[in-house]
Image (cartoon, rainbow, N blue to C red):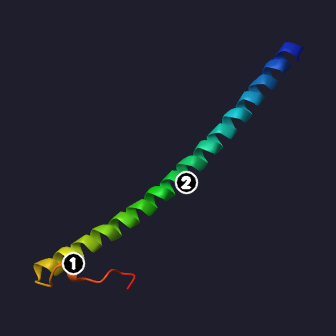
Amino acid sequence: MSDTLNERITQLEIQLAHTQRTCDQLNEVVTKLSLDAQTRDRMLQRLMDQVKDFKNKLDDGGGSLEDEKPPHY
């Protein structure tokens, strides 16, 4: 093979290595964001359940939320 062809192949291999590294980094970011989103979804669901519970207590004549003790008591 000629030197220019070897140089071109080497440059392509370097570019491929950089592209693979970038793809790996992007995959890590996407995976982390997905896990973060799942955590937020679970937290949001718990909050929605708590709001429903409070609303049900109020609708059932369970008194006002002002009468409830905070959770740290």
Q: Quadrant of residue 64?
A: bottom left
Q: Residue 9, image x and y in percent?
A: 79, 23
Circle 1 is placed at which residue position? Answer: 66
Quote the CA–CA distance across marks 1 and 2: 40 Å
Q: Residue 33, image x and y in percent?
A: 50, 52
Q: Which amino acid type is marked by label 2?
A: Lys
Q: Which amino acid type is marked by label 1?
A: Glu
Q: Residue 24, image x and y in percent?
A: 64, 44
Marks counted in the figure total 2
Residue at x 49% of width, y 54% of height: 34
Residue at x 84% of width, y 19% of height: 7
In this orientation, does residue 2 appear?
A: no
- Mark 2: give few (<14), some (14-19) or many (20+) Cα within 10 Å: few
Circle 2 is placed at which residue position? Answer: 32
In this orientation, does residue 21 appear?
A: yes
- Mark 1: give few (<14), some (14-19) or many (20+) Cα within 10 Å: few
Identify whether 37 is placed above or below 1: below
Image depth: mark 1 or mark 2 in front = 1
Q: Is residue 16 left or right of residue 49?
A: right
Q: Quadrant of residue 13?
A: top right
